[in-house]
Image: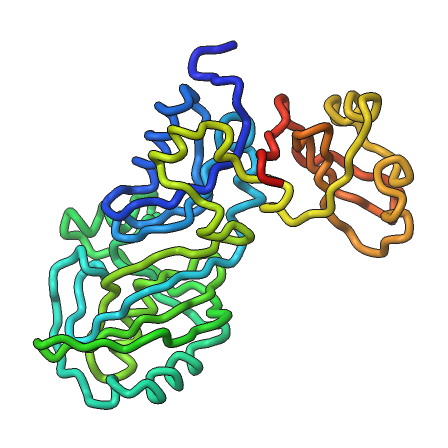
Amino acid sequence: MKRGQSGLSLVIGIDKPQGMSSHDAVNRIRRMFGERRVGHMGTLDPLATGVLAVCVGPASRLDAYLTNHDKTYEARIAFGAQTDTDDAAGEVIRQAAVAPELSDATFAQEYLASIVGPRMQMPPAYSAIKKDGVKAYEAARRGKAVELEARPVEVRAADLLAIDTDDAGRVFWDVRLEVSKGTYIRSIARDAGLELGSAAHLSALRRVHAGRLGIEACVSLEEAGRSGIAAACDPVDLLGFPALEVDVRMAESIRCGRPLPLSALDPDAVHAHELGMRCIVFRDELVALYETDPFRGQAHPRCVFSQGVFRGTHR
């Protein structure tokens, strides 16, 4: 076994603590498991907490299949001040009055309902988006303005959880947002202030779902260290593709990456009229992802693991 390879292949749901970057969380996992090949599926800012899917070993090849899902957040929007980072970590660059209607729950929910749907969103100046090969936040820290372009995103659902106020006259909205990949909650907070004639920034953020991975299935970094592979999630459940269990003979063919007739792979797929992915399972491991092609009567390998991904102990 090469240096930096632990012999493990698994996915762990981490409840990332506040004040730690996603990269820092990955480094902690690397040290815990003695594995160099570790990656996370969807960055969380240091301010944010919550769901961070971490893939260890050969399981890191699942990143292309786990990063494109919708995400759900619980966020706190603070009205009265806008910051340069659009969150509480930045410097205040603008202050504005907070209108009385911002304390009204009906008004707040009506506004949230109005942002549901597709829209063009301007990313924060402090973001990891690259412009001319330079990350926007790196340029912003050097005092250089970066001309970012608005990007298409979609808010699937937006609900008001609570409204709070403080002695300084600030108003806080606690909201739950379900959004498409690439949506910045910081931008939603900033835009709420602008569109409602005030100023606003994101003061707290917790990711409660990333695709099919919910916060209830996540563990702290400390618990991951204590539990080891017992903390693993089932990758088949996270992917959401139909699963097919195979025998030893077929598993050997699949590990060689051979195309397979649909009749051998999945009898039900013979009559299917659309393309689809299949999780191939042997014993307690995910060994490959195959894509069915009913028009050619075959299934082709899209991802074959040199070491199967452990399916966890809580199935």
Would you say residue 60 is visible in this rendering?
yes
Instruction: State which quarter of the image contains the C terminus.
Output: top right
Between 246 and 87, the one nearer to me in the picture: 246
Instruction: Describe the colour scheme in one phrase.
Output: rainbow
Q: Is residue 229 above or below residue 296?
A: above
Q: How many marks?
A: 0
Left or right, 132 with reference to 246: left
Q: Is residue 168 above or below residue 87?
A: below
Between 288 and 222, the one nearer to me in the picture: 222
Q: Position of residue 184 (x, y in %)?
A: 36, 61
Residue displayed at 86% across by 53% down: 272
Q: Position of residue 255 (x, y in %)?
A: 73, 23
Residue displayed at 71% across by 39% down: 279
Q: Position of residue 4 (x, y in %)?
A: 43, 16
Left or right, 199 with reference to 183: left
Q: Position of residue 57 (x, y in %)?
A: 51, 26
Residue displayed at 55% across by 33% down: 61
Residue displayed at 43% across by 73% down: 158
Would you say residue 131 is visible in this rendering?
no
Between 299 and 88, the one nearer to me in the picture: 88
Q: Quadrant of residue 76?
A: bottom left
